[in-house]
Image: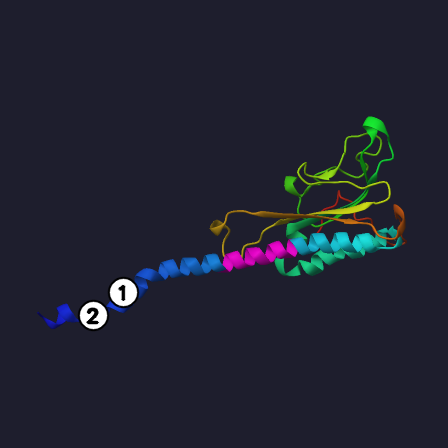
């Protein structure tokens, strides 16, 4: 047997070369999975933080209060470019005060922020004023998990949508849209109507902007 036939010094290098594409693919998927998990956490944080903080505003709430709350979306989501790739819809939900078949929920006011303008980023349960004089809005949320304000409790409901920004390549998981919703009961607020505030611009839902 010749020396060449028994020489195995290049076997390990060849095995590494053959396995490298597999290892690299696994590593890339791992990095993308971790980034997706972080983005999902950020989206959930935005939904919960804005709803909770809006529900905590005491006595009354005005446009300046809401603008400060919405600014938090960009602060929390800065690392995932939320301003240009996301959308927040925050709604104040109350009983409509009607009776019989007209009784239901009423979206008293609604404000938005974020530049994402797609079908998925639109208010899912209705726009400002929905349900005020009829029973078209029985609850917020899905039929499996309905949420409704009562005669003594008003709700702040947030809908957050984000078009995922991959760190490696979109081809790994395909295009993804992350969504999170949150609801909190209003605490210690005597007036639920949204008041105007000097020099405060209304964050109306017909405007799509990253700031």
Q: Observer-nearest residue: 172 or 132?
A: 132
Please name the residue that numbered disc 1 is placed on: 14
Task: Say how many tags the image has.
Answer: 2
**SS assignment at label 1:** helix
Is the Cβ of the residue at disc 1 closer than 8 Å to that at disc 2?
Answer: no
* Quadrant housing the N terminus: bottom left
Magenta portion: prevailing SS class? helix
**SS assignment at label 2:** loop
Neighbours of disc 2 within 10 Å: few (<14), some (14-19), many (20+): few
Q: Quadrant of residue 41?
A: bottom right
Residue 158 is labelled as none
Q: CA distance from mark 1 to mark 2?
A: 10 Å
Residue drawn 62% across the image and 58% down it:
80
* Quadrant housing the C terminus: bottom right
**Residue 157 position in % (x across, y down):** 75, 46
Q: How is the image coloured?
A: rainbow
Residue sitting at the far left: 1
- Magenta segment: 31-43
Neighbours of disc 1 within 10 Å: few (<14), some (14-19), many (20+): few
Q: Is residue 40 magenta?
A: yes
Q: Quadrant of residue 91?
A: top right
Q: Observer-nearest residue: 192 or 123?
A: 192
Please name the residue that numbered disc 2 is placed on: 8
């Amino acid at each position: 047997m010749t020396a060449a036939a028994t020489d195995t010094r290049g076997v390990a290098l060849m095995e590494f070369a053959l396995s490298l594409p597999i290892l690299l693919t696994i590593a890339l998927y791992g990095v993308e999975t971790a980034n997706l998990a972080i983005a999902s956490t950020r989206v959930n944080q935005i939904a919960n933080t804005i709803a909770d903080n809006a529900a905590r505003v005491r006595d009354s709430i005005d446009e300046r209060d809401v603008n400060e709350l919405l600014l938090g979306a960009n602060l929390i989501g800065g690392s995932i470019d939320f301003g240009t790739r996301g959308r927040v819809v925050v709604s104040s939900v109350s009983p409509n005060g009607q009776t019989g078949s007209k009784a239901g929920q009423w979206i008293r006011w609604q404000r938005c922020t974020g530049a994402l303008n797609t079908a998925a980023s639109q208010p899912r349960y209705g726009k400002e004023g929905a349900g005020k004089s009829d029973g078209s809005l029985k609850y917020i949320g899905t039929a499996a998990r309905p949420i409704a304000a009562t005669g003594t409790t008003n709700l702040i409901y947030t809908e957050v949508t984000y078009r995922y920004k991959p760190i490696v390549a979109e081809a790994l998981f395909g295009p993804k849209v992350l969504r999170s919703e949150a609801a909190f009961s209003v605490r210690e607020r005597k007036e639920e109507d949204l008041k105007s505030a000097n020099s405060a611009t209304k964050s109306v839902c017909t405007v799509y902007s990253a700031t």
